[in-house]
Image: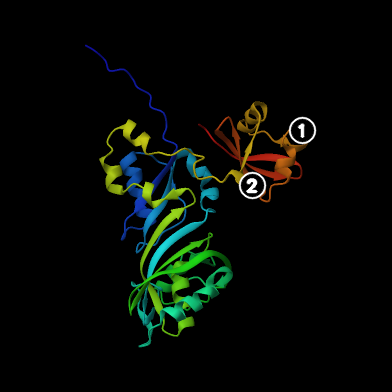
Amino acid sequence: MHLKPNIVRPKLNGWINLNKPEGFSSFKCVYIIKKLIKIKKVGHAGTLDPLASGVLPIALGEATKALRFAVENEKTYTFIITWGSETSTDDKEGEILKKSDNRPSKKAILEKIKLFNGDILQTPPNYSAIKINGIRSYKLARLGKTLKLNERKITVHNFKLLNIINKNEAKFFVKCQKGTYVRSLARDLGQELGVFGHVSYLKRESVGNFCIKKSISLDQIEKLSHYSAKQDIILPILYPINENDIIEVSQKTSENLLKGKKVIIENLMDKTIIENKESKFFLTRFEGNPVAICLQENGILLPKRVFNV
C-alpha cells in the first residue's frame, strides 16, 4: 500500500486584480472568491456599486492587513450620463425625482465641467455606504428616512468629456482621489447645466497600479482549479502600496517588529526618513518583504499589524 505524501502548500497571500461584473455587489464578489479559492481572509479595496463594473482589488490572506493603504490610491473611471432626469440614487436604478426637456450643448458641457476639477466640495449620494449614527445611509434611504449628508472636500485630478453619444447621453472620464462619488459628479453637473442627469453606465478603469487591461474575471478565476494556476494570478502583498508609504528597515529592526516590540526611532539609521513622513502610519519592509504596519508616536515605532509571511 502506497501512501500519498502529505504536501504542505504555502498560504495564499497577495492581491487579485478582479474585473467586477455589473450586477454583482463587492461583497458578493468577495464571497464567491472565498469559495473558489478556499481561503478565509478576503477583503476588497474600494467598494463598487452593483451597477458598476471594473477594477476591484481583492486582498487575500495577509494582504488584507494592507487594505488601508490600497484604498488611498487614486482611481479612474469612464461613465455615461443620461440627461433629462435626476434620480433618488443618482443612477438608473433609482426613482425619478426631477425631469427636464432641456439638453446641454457640447460647449456648455465643456464650460461647466471646469467647475469640477481640483479640490471641490461634494455631497455624497443618499444611497451610499457613509454611516449616520452608525447606520449606513443607503439603509436609512431605503426606509424612506429624510437624509442630510454633509459636504466633503474631494480632489478631482481630471474630469473630461470623451464624446457626445447622442442628445440624451454623453461619455466622460474622471481621475480622482479616495472619497469621490461619480454619481454625485453626474448629478451636480446636470444641475449646473440646468438639464438634470444621472449615471447610466459606470466602469472603474484603475485603482493605483491595478488597471482594467490586466484584470481577471470571476469566470477565469472559477476555471483555475489547481494551486499553481491560482498562485500565478496572485500579485505580491506590496504590489499596490505607494513607495511613500514604505520604509526599509534593517534585519535587527525587522526581527524586533515581528516580535511586537517597540523600536526607538532615535536609534535607527533611517530615523530622518521616518520622522519626515507625513502620515503617522506606514508599512515597514525588509529585503522586499513586508514586516509590519507601524505607527510613529512620541519617538517610538509601534508595530500595529505584523505580517506572517
Instruction: Check the image and name the residue furthest to the top.
Output: 1
Residue 165: image quadrant is bottom left
> Is residue 30 something one can see in this rendering?
no
Say which amino acid is labelled 1. Answer: Asn
Q: Residues within 10 Å of mark 1 (few under 14, many from 20)?
A: few
Precedes in sequence: disc 1 or disc 2: 1
Drawn side of residue 154 relative to residue 99, left or right = right
Could you say which disc has been placed on residue 267 in the image? 1
* Relative height, residue 281 to residue 132 (above, below): above
Q: Residues within 10 Å of mark 2 (few under 14, many from 20)?
A: many
Viewer-nearest residue: 291 or 115: 115
In this rendering, the answer to whether 195 lies above or below 279 is: below
Which quarter of the rendering shows the N terminus?
A: top left
Q: Position of residue 24 (x, y in %)?
A: 32, 58
Q: Secondary structure at mark 2?
A: strand
Task: Look at the picture and state if 182 lies above or below 218.
Answer: below
What numbered label is drawn on residue 281?
Answer: 2
